[in-house]
Image: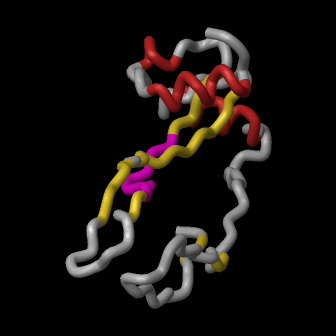
Amino acid sequence: MVAVSPVVKVSDSDGWVTYPLVPVRTFEPRVEVSDPSVSARRVYAELAERVGMGSEGRFVQAEAVRILQSSFTVDCPGSTTTPVYGSVTPYGGSAGASLQCGVDPAKEGGDEAWMKEAYELTCGRI
């Protein structure tokens, strides 16, 4: 974990709630080796190959949330006013992906629409 929000009290009447993130730690990528003839570049290249990232290319990180949109009508009993119409747009659950330009995300198991959109916005057409 690198950041967390403070506790935010939320009531039923609150609308949009923002959770400001506060950094709790930083980290700096580094390589420490006992033999100086082994370069950091070589170590990172080997690591990337082992974790399946590919060792070179152009990458983009994308984050998404799942959105639910719904319309509603409310009739208040005993009221002579007209019904209230509205909509609600909450979200829940998040997802993220690292996409490599030149590699179709759908062919790598990333077949969600937001992945295609992120790819096309940053890398161009598939």
Q: Position of residue 34 (x, y in %)?
A: 68, 52
Q: Position of residue 104 (x, y in %)?
A: 54, 13
Find the residue positioned furthest to the left. Answer: 77
Total number of numbered discs in the rendering = 0
Q: Nearer the viewer, residue 65 or 46?
A: 65
Q: In the image, 117: left or right of 96?
A: right
The verdict on residue 68 being magenta is: no
Magenta segment main secondary structure: strand
Q: Nearer the viewer, residue 41 or 108?
A: 108
Q: In the image, 14: left or right of 100?
A: left
State which quadrant residue 56 falls in: top right
Placement of the C terminus among the 4 image quadrants: top right
Q: In the image, 32: left or right of 96?
A: right
Q: Nearer the viewer, residue 121 or 78?
A: 78
At x 32%, y 75%, the residue is: 80
At x 40%, y 58%, the residue is: 85
Residue 70, above or below 26: above
The verdict on residue 94 being magenta is: yes
Q: Nearer the viewer, residue 21 or 114?
A: 114
At x 67%, y 19%, the residue is: 101
At x 37%, y 65%, the residue is: 82
Q: Position of residue 110 (x, y in %)?
A: 43, 24
Q: Which residues are magenta?
A: 86-96
State which quadrant residue 102 falls in: top right
Residue 28, above or below 94: below
Residue 87, above or below 114: below
Q: How is the image coloured?
A: secondary structure
Q: Position of residue 97 (x, y in %)?
A: 52, 37
